[in-house]
Image (cartoon, helix red, strand yellow):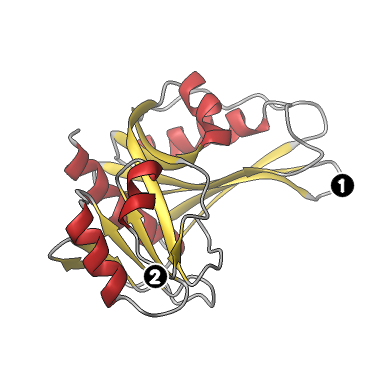
């Protein structure tokens, strides 16, 4: 897939995953009205350049508004105006072929649970005491599906739970009819995704108005 197609699919899937209103097309890309206290809205710019980013920075004045730019953080840092910061770890877009696979194997004492609600497939790994050890979700929108909110909690890391979640999500997306998976990740997760066959597409840098920190 080319960059514009991956970005378009990611925007649609992310909005479905987070239960926001549908994305709105804008001249520079897309807008999503997220509506969270520290993540009011986000503008996604697939092909950013300095004039476009500066104009957005000057126009968008709401505190905790975000810009998501498919550009390197070093470039973005030069383009933004006062009042905007780059709080995210370096981010990137990745994609992979989706296909069903065998049920993932978990260490003793863990159990995997899946559910499908409002178009989103959710996977949870529970520890023996019933606490949440790892999770993730995938939102199919036709032939593409977006993996989102993958996390392994403290005390349960380095046990293969993240890989189990990703394999279960891959199967869920494929069984829903999607053939390509897309995700936005950080440096921390890149090694895991790469080991599971995900391919690097390009950088993704987030900036936020008036500091603050929002959900990825």
Task: Give the left or right position of residue 198, taking residue 55 as reference.
Answer: right
First in sequence: mark 2 vs mark 1: 2
Farthest residue toward the left?
27
Secondary structure of the residue carrying numbered label 1 = loop
Q: What residue did someone put label 1 on?
A: 129
Q: Nearer the viewer, residue 9 or 186?
A: 186
Q: Quadrant location of the N terminus? A: top left
Give percent across and percent down for residue 6: 25, 42
Tell me how far mark 2 sits from mark 1, CA to CA.
33 Å
Task: Give the left or right position of residue 113, taking residue 99 as reference.
Answer: right
Point out the frontmost of discs 2 and 1. Answer: 2
Residue 23 shows in the view: no
Give percent across and percent down for residue 93: 36, 38
Secondary structure of the residue carrying numbered label 2 = loop
Q: What residue did someone put label 2 on?
A: 20
Give percent across and percent down for residue 68: 35, 55
Q: Nearer the viewer, residue 100 or 24?
A: 24
């Amino acid at each position: 897939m080319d960059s514009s197609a991956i970005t378009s699919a990611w925007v649609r899937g992310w909005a479905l995953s987070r239960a926001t209103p549908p994305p709105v097309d804008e001249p520079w890309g897309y807008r999503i009205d997220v509506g969270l206290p520290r993540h009011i809205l986000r503008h996604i710019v697939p092909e950013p350049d300095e004039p476009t980013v500066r104009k957005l920075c000057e126009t968008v004045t709401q505190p905790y508004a975000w810009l998501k730019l498919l550009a390197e953080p070093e470039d973005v840092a030069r383009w933004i105006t006062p009042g905007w910061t780059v709080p995210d770890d370096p981010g990137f877009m990745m994609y992979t072929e989706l296909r069903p696979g065998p049920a993932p194997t978990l260490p003793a004492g863990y159990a995997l649970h899946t559910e499908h609600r409002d178009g989103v497939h959710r996977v949870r790994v529970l520890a023996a005491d019933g606490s949440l050890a790892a999770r993730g979700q995938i939102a199919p929108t036709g032939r593409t599906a977006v993996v989102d909110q993958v996390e392994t909690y403290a005390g349960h890391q380095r046990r293969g739970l993240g890989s189990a979640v990703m394999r279960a999500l891959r199967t869920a997306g494929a069984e829903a009819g999607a053939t390509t998976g897309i995700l936005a990740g950080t440096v921390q997760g890149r090694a895991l995704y790469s080991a599971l066959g995900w391919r690097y597409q390009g950088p993704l840098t987030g900036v936020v108005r008036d500091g603050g920190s929002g959900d990825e």
